[in-house]
Amino acid sequence: MPPTDERSNRSEPSSEPRSELSTFASVRRLHPYVRTALPRLAAGLAASLGASLMALAIPRVLQWVTDGPLTAGARDHDWSGLAWSVALVAVLGAGEAGLILLRRTLVMFPGTRVEAAMRMSLFRHLQDLPVSFHDRWPGGQLLSRIMGDLGLLRRWLVFGIIQLVVSIVTIVVGVGLLVATGGWLGIIFLCGAIPVTVLAFRFSRRYRKISRLSQDQSGDLATTVEESVHGIRVLKAFGRGPDALDQFTEQAAELRETEIRKATTDAGLTTALRVIPEVTQAVALVVGAYLVAQGDMTLGALVAFFTTTAVINGPVVDLGMTLSMTLNARTAVDRFFEVMDTVNPLTDPERPARPEPVTPGRGGATGGHVAFRDVTFRYDDAARPVLRHVDLELPPGTTTALVGLTGSGKSTLAMLAPRLFDVTVGRVEVDGVDVRDLTRTQVRERVAVAFEDPTLFSASVRDNVLLGVSDDLPDAERETLLAESLEIAQAHFVADLPDGADTRIGEEGMSLSGGQRQRLALARAIAARPRVLVLDDPLSALDVTTEEAVTARLRDVLAATTTLVIAHRPSTVALADRVAVLQDGRVTAVGTHQELLASDPHYRHIISSLTSEPTPSPTSQEALS
């Protein structure tokens, strides 16, 4: 009885309810990333607080000058005390400016390092997450998180959080001084803080929702741009450019409306933060003038009071900006951890098996034995399994063609060998070892894939073809692998490129034809010299003559490699030593082409549907007959 242990391919949700975290709790999650930068950030905060306290000390000096040296100097014609007072104010002002400069110097570099570390961590996690995650997440959303959100977080770390703390401390200390030294005037000013606090609380609740909506809509808009750029040929070919523009315009208008709502909410708080202090100052001025006239307050105390309010008013007005920046940062933190909290179900075992190491080279690697044992697979969002109780053996050094009607599960089965997905039930073995008992690196050293729809990168031809080749291989051997792989894939066009193999191809290889991209992708799989090679109809875009040449050379290179070929054409079946028939998610027959033609009606139906495609070359027809 084959083993049937079940290991789910579902992603586990985060155990922490992100939507219910407070702003402080959300921001606190940044600690692992900012830990090394904390000393300099704390020093920058201390410098900024020192500057604020120096600014609050200046009104005390002015009070002393007004009630002391200024009055006495005018009476006794002795201005020495006034000179010392002016010098003290100048020293305090210069100290404030110096501390502000020090703060900027201290926080600039650690902020950029934190941003870089978070960006690298997010990108590393994105590379580690399985294909199923990237199937669900739009590229624009991920791009907006790794670029826009992290840039916003950096600005908040180096300015927003420090400014928020300094503003709050300045307001609290300043109001305390006003109440302690200004008497009734301080109480009047304190009364104005009550509506400010209420408004700030209501603002934070409203603004947080709008901020999240804005950042999500920005990600959606980035996705639309990305899809339009990648699909520009299709849009032009079908004349759908205006429709794409209409969709973009609609999304951009929605984002604009959200940004206007956000700006309006921010402006409402900023207006209140300007008006309320001004009103309290006007009331305090009337009361203060009366108290001075009655002799209940000195002129110096009145001057100190209004000078202190001038120092406080700046942080009060800035409070709206720093609050909005903090709430934007909180949203960015939530969006960052939505990705980072995604658990990768394709994990490496704690104690991986240690099979014979793969040593690729000119001779290739010895063919591996692949076995699918009672394999059942269901996608996360599917109601029923795509594959059910599949048993299939791929003997070492053989080539097996996998055929079936559209939707039978051929590509899904092929993707289980390199562990791009994990089986729901059953086992996939390479050389007798469950692929889940190997690290993903070990699996992919042994199994290489050439997809029907090739993906190339904005790099040189050499870098694309040698993508799966170890950097430790000597340069001479790498060049030999490159030349041989290009020759086997019949990619002779590379010699005609402006810089040969060093030519940098455009994004996704769109500067090349479909057949050229397929040949480079095939060369990339061949260059890896794997034990197991999975070919997902990699010759579909080739002309008949080129396909014949590639097929002939593949027969030589695949002689020592276990190969699984997903066949969509009779010419692809010609590569195979034997054929496996997949029907409704089950392997219903395995044998040679001749055996299956004689014994399996469903196979004859499949072959008849395949031969309705362009007629294969005579060489391929002979191989099938």
Image (spheres, helix red, strand yellow):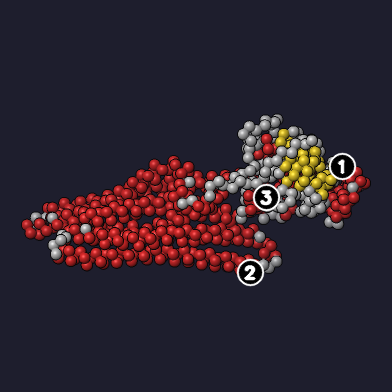
Instruction: Say which element carries label 1.
Output: strand
Dot in front, 2 or 3: 3
- Sort mark 3 into few (<14), some (14-19) or many (20+) by Cα contacts within 10 Å: some
Tell me what residue is drawn at x 25 percent, y 66 percent.
Answer: 283
Tell me what residue is drawn at x 25 percent, y 59 percent.
Answer: 186
Q: CA distance from mark 2 to mark 3?
A: 36 Å
Instruction: Say which element carries label 3.
Output: loop
x%, y% of residue 57?
24, 52
Question: Which residue has dot 1 on it?
Answer: 591
Q: Looking at the figure, which quarter contains the N terminus?
A: top right
- Sort mark 2 into few (<14), some (14-19) or many (20+) by Cα contacts within 10 Å: few
Mark 2 / mark 3, whichever is N-terminal: 2
* Type of the residue with mark 1: Gly
**Viewer can see residue 97:** no
Q: CA distance from mark 2 to mark 1?
A: 52 Å
x%, y% of residue 116?
49, 46
Residue 37, by quadrant, is top left
Q: Nearer the viewer, residue 126 or 387?
A: 387
Dot in front, 1 or 3: 3
Dot in front, 2 or 1: 1
* Type of the residue with mark 2: Pro
Mark 1 / mark 3, whichever is N-terminal: 3
- Sort mark 1 into few (<14), some (14-19) or many (20+) by Cα contacts within 10 Å: some
Tell me what residue is drawn at x 48 percent, y 46 percent.
Answer: 29
* Type of the residue with mark 3: Asp
Question: Which residue has dot 2 on it?
Answer: 242
Question: Which residue has dot 3 on it?
Answer: 380
x%, y% of residue 456?
66, 50
Left or right: 193 as drawn, with respect to 117 = left
Q: Residue furthest left?
A: 76
